[in-house]
Image (cartoon, helix red, strand yellow):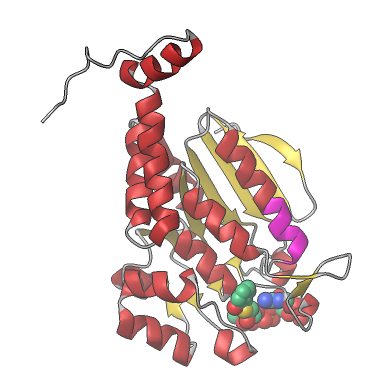
Amino acid sequence: VNWQTVKTYEDILYHKTDGIAKITINRPHKRNAFRPKTVFELYDAFCDAREDTNIGVVLFTGAGPHTDGKYAFCAGGDQSVRGQAGYVDDAGIPRLNVLDLQRLIRSMPKVVIALVAGYAIGGGHVLHLICDLTIAADNAIFGQTGPKVGSFDGGFGASYLARIVGQKKAREIWFLCRQYNAQQAQDMGLVNYVVPVEQLETEGIQWAQEILEKSPIAIRCLKAAFNADCDGQAGLQELAGNATLLYYMTEEGSEGKQAFLEKRPPNFRTFPWLP
Ligand code: 2NE
């Protein structure tokens, strides 16, 4: 695969190849923990991938291994910049902007695949969780740390986790703050597939290529439908937005607009009232 650099950032790497974007957190010395700047950069790259009509799949991963040989997808919020009201940016403003990123990944009508090597911990675990699919390397380690380090994610991090692994297991994960290996994560439905670490990207590309052979509108409607089950009115808005998009693409929808522009009554009588 011939990855092309899309844009240069400080904390992340952003590449594209045919139909696939790859977004990489690049702070291996911090186990790829995110500060507000990291999240703003991720948001920018994910927005670009959402807007690019050639891109159908985003691979989301962490740079590694670090010089100590260890891998990480992401170790959550950077505790060294955590202030009294959030993670403090260069202007001194405390933020939890990772929540905006979670919503973007979840609602964008492209398939986001987390490629997890090493640690997916804390807010980094929630980031893989909200991706559509997760492929884990055999060295992956999953877990929440909030109650140990004075934090928690009561949004997707709690309720969506419980949807995936069940209420009992989700409570265990949060209340005990244990770490789970790739096999355990697969057994509880947290990851789709486990591969040797050196095959992680190749496997991700293979999954992306299979998805790219499929119908973009079918995939976007399915993603919205899966979300609608959990996301309340925001989920319904997403699903309904796709219905509107499809309606605009019909002759029937176009007739209403055309009639308005031509200052004539619309003629919907030629369109059937299907059963
Ligand atoms: C990830 C883990 C288990 C790895 O352990 P180990 O032993 O392999 O590495 P070590 O030595 O702990 O970490 C290596 C370097 O990365 C830094 C460390 O401070 C260390 O730096 P140096 O001492 O070499 O300078 N590092 C790792 N994680 C960091 C972090 N999150 N912030 C800043 N520096 C970090 C182990 O490192 C670990 O447990 N890390 C902390 C995980 C954590 O608690 N994350 C925050 C959870 S809260 C959160 O993410 C959150 C939320 O709950 C709600 C909203 C938004 C965010």
Residue 222 sits inside the magenta stretch: no
Q: Residue at x 27, y 17 (%)?
A: 268
Give whichever of 102, 234 is nearer the camera.
234
Q: Position of residue 21 (x, y in %)?
A: 57, 39
| Residue 132 makes an appearance in the image | no
How many badges with numbers are in the image? 0
Single out the residue that lies furthest toward the left: 275
Q: Indicate left or right for 93 with 135 as reference.
A: right
* Picture quadrant of residue 27: bottom right
Give whichever of 272, 91 is nearer the camera.
272
* Picture quadrant of residue 87: bottom right
- The vertical placement of 110 against 200, above or below, is above
Residue 41 sits inside the magenta stretch: yes
| Residue 205 makes an appearance in the image | yes
Q: Residue at x 33, y 68 (%)?
A: 186
Q: Indicate left or right for 48 with 257 as reference.
A: right
Q: Position of residue 85 (x, y in %)?
A: 75, 80
Can you tell me which quadrant of the image ligand 1 is in?
Answer: bottom right
Q: Residue at x 49, y 87 (%)?
A: 177
Q: Quadrant of the C terminus?
A: top left
Q: Quadrant of the N terminus?
A: top right
Q: Position of residue 151 (x, y in %)?
A: 61, 84
Magenta-colored span:
35-42
- The vertical placement of 113 against 79, above or below, is above
Q: Residue at x 44, y 61 (%)?
A: 136
Give the main secondary structure of the magenta stretch: helix
Q: Indicate left or right for 25 with 223 as reference.
A: right
Give whichever of 22, 194 is nearer the camera.
22
- The vertical placement of 205 against 272, above or below, is below
